[in-house]
Amino acid sequence: MSNQEFLVTQLDLKTSYRLLGNGYGIQSNVRWQPQFYFSDVQELANRIHADLVLKKVLPYKLIGQANFRVQRDDVGNNPFSFQSAEVGINLNWQRFSKLAPSLFFSYLGGEYRFISQTDITATQLGFSITQILKPGFKLLYGLQLHTYESSSLSEIQQSFRYGPQFKISLRRNYTLDITYRLLGMDIDGFESTGLENYFRLVIGKLFADSWSLFIFAEGHTRNLDIPSDYSQAALFLPSESENRFYIKLERELSSRMAIHLKSGYQRNDLLLSNVRFAGLQAVLGFSYKR
């Protein structure tokens, strides 16, 4: 793997809309991130993500939620691009005061382009229970099943991932969320079962009424014995290959306006780690709420 280092300037624009009614809710988000790479061959990259969330109170104390998401990532003259569309359905049963069973299913279709085109489909099925141990203290535990299929001109490949997930949420004079997932991986053409570890950490603290500090970390580690003659490119989605860490300092200027400074590190391993986007980031942002 060859290394190239260059400066990237990014504009991060995001707009959100929320509507709450009697027994229903609607939220939409659109995010556009044009990036300009200052390298020997100057390139412009584009990232566009949009999603729509519909929430409805159903009979028998069920809460239904439908998610629709599209995204497209292009890296200028580089032959890499990824686009996808995803739909998800979540059912949450609020029958009990301190236990909330939940069932989730999603389907994603998309394509990679890297030298050649690879079509992909991915599904997720999950069952979890959220338990309120005490006010401000929640524990989630459940099971997940992920399927993944990629097809190119030369071959079709399938993989399955399965295992438990845990999450701890604390709400005191600070915020603490810890998520951990352990998945076994069975992949066509691989002799042994691999293991994937996923973790996510969010820490937040409010200072002096108008200042807040957030620490965020997310990462994947995989123990996978890849055959030396393996040629299939895409084993995982880009979102399943991201490792991120950042610190965000925010100051509220009013009930509608805020500024923030965010700095950290991000790495995305693509295509069996033969392509890697990694680097330090510093972002100065401004937000406005109507």
Image: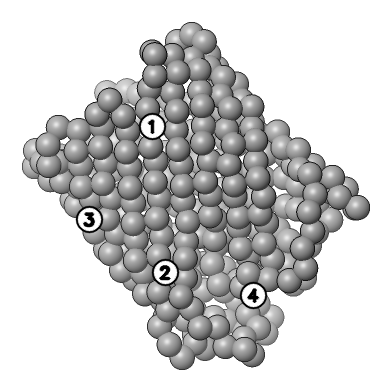
Q: Quadrant of residue 227?
A: bottom right
Residue at image point 76% right, 43% down: 8
| Circle 4 residue | 233
Residue at image point 15% right, 46% down: 131
Total numbered circles: 4
| Secondary structure beneath label 4 | loop
Q: Quadrant of residue 44?
A: top right
Q: Residue furthest top?
A: 254
Q: Are marks 2 and 1 in contact (CB under 8 Å)?
A: no
| Circle 1 residue | 204
- Which of the two labelled residues, at mark 4 and mark 2, occupies the earlier sequence position? 2
State whether residue 95 appears in this view: no
| Circle 3 residue | 141
Foreground tag (2 vs 3): 2
- In this picture, residue 158 sits left or right of residue 38: left
Foreground tag (1 vs 4): 1
Q: Are marks 4 and 3 in contact (CB under 8 Å)?
A: no
Q: CA distance from mark 1 to mark 4?
A: 38 Å
- Which of the two labelled residues, at mark 2 and mark 3, occupies the earlier sequence position? 3
Q: How is the image coloured?
A: one colour
